[in-house]
Image (cartoon, rainbow, N blue to C red):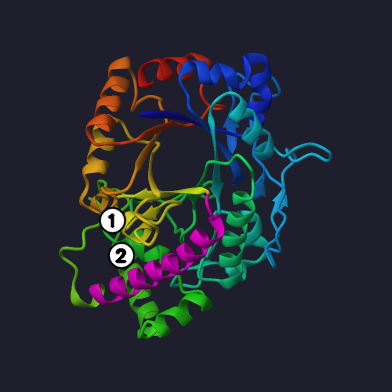
Amino acid sequence: MQLALYVHPFDLRALADHGGIARLRDLGFAELSIATSYHDGRWLTPWNPERRVRFLEDGCVHFRPRGDYGLLRPMLSSEVREGEASPLERLCVEAAQAGMSARAWTVFGHNTQFGLQHPELSVENAHGDRYPYALCPAQPAVSDYHSRMVGDLAAHEGLGTIELEALGQMGIKHSSHHDKKSFTPKGLLDFAMSACFCPACMTLYEADGRDGEQVRRSVRAFVDAMTRDADAMAPPASPADDAGLADEQRAWVDAVLSVRRGTVARLAARVVAASGEVARAVQVHADPWFTGSQLSAASAAAFPVTDQRVFTCYGEGPDQIAAGLDHEGARVTAASPRRVCVWPKAPQFRTDDDLVQLREVCVSRGVESVAVYHLGLLPWRTVERVAKILS
């Protein structure tokens, strides 16, 4: 079972004082997954000599785009410096020299910079609210941006894999800025508030033989009823379940799912064509109602079965990870190579026994790769501890 590590360009730069990439190789890591396009964030970096708290550059790329992107031209980060190789170019060379693989970990549609500059390209819920952090992949300009970025990444010599994150349509559940709500959405409320009704999606409803305006009215009525009848003091609700859907709910749920999956299928065809001979890895989630930065496993079925399926389990411990891999929604990934990504921190991981259990869970379920998140966020003692057990 291969051990991999997620990194940012500033992590690799700081490694010079910690033994360089060779130290990671000697710890047992076989692959480094570098962020090539990322969103904003505030990180506490425990060992970086430059700073302790870092605010990430929103919506920027850590490589040099070369193709014609049209409306959405990628913005270079400060890590792409004049007269120097880009962080991705450097990693492709240095990883090969160390006997390791390089992966382009790429966030696509989660881009607040573009969403604010071009709100017409962002996800629009049934009430007309826009989510500026979420570009809608049904929009031609967004689909062009995604596929052309894949083509640019694939042109890097020495790159082993492109990992696809936030390729589909994100929804309300993904964190934005100082998110606040007074009650826990139950049932299908998150899913309903994540359904997109931008002009491009409305066209797709009609093309799918649906009355888009009727679907929108149904979703809006459902959201209104669920929020009106909510109780801020009620205990957390159980996850969404489609078993008991009423007929009127089933109609709009089927319509939204159909448009979502159709959008992913069309985009998947473009991504596969653009990536050429470079391997692909698709971030997935077992929950069919999931609307975060991973695709539902069912939607990701549009990609070839040989493409790796990546389960990002950042807030889950060994038992939850096992349940996710065994979930009915994950069965469609059984024939594909699978990877599990973990963030080894309390309370999910407290002891070495938790790491041993994780290893056993992955081995027993045929997981080919475990990836650790994230070099810059973890203290060195944790990186070494995790590598010792998982490798």
The residue type indicated by label 1 comes to Lys
The alpha-carbon separation of the residues under discs 2 and 1 comes to 8 Å
Q: Position of residue 227 (x, y in %)?
A: 34, 63
Q: Where is residue 20 in the image (x, y as percent from the top left)?
A: 63, 19
Residue 56 location, quadrant:
top right
Q: In this view, does 169 lie above or below 340?
A: below
Q: Position of residue 219 (x, y in %)?
A: 35, 73
Q: Position of residue 79 (x, y in %)?
A: 73, 38
What residue is drawn where x is 66% and y is 30%? Answer: 10
The residue type indicated by label 2 comes to Met
What residue is drawn where x is 52% and y is 51%? Answer: 277
> Can residue 40 be seen here?
no
Q: In this view, does 341 lie above or below 129?
A: above
Quadrant (top left, top right, bottom left, bottom right) of the N terminus: top left
| Mark number, residue 226 | 2
For the residues bearing labels 2 and 1, Cβ distance under 8 angstroms: yes
Q: Quick one: label 2 or label 1, which is nearer the N terminus?
A: 1
What residue is drawn where x is 40% and y is 26%? Answer: 344
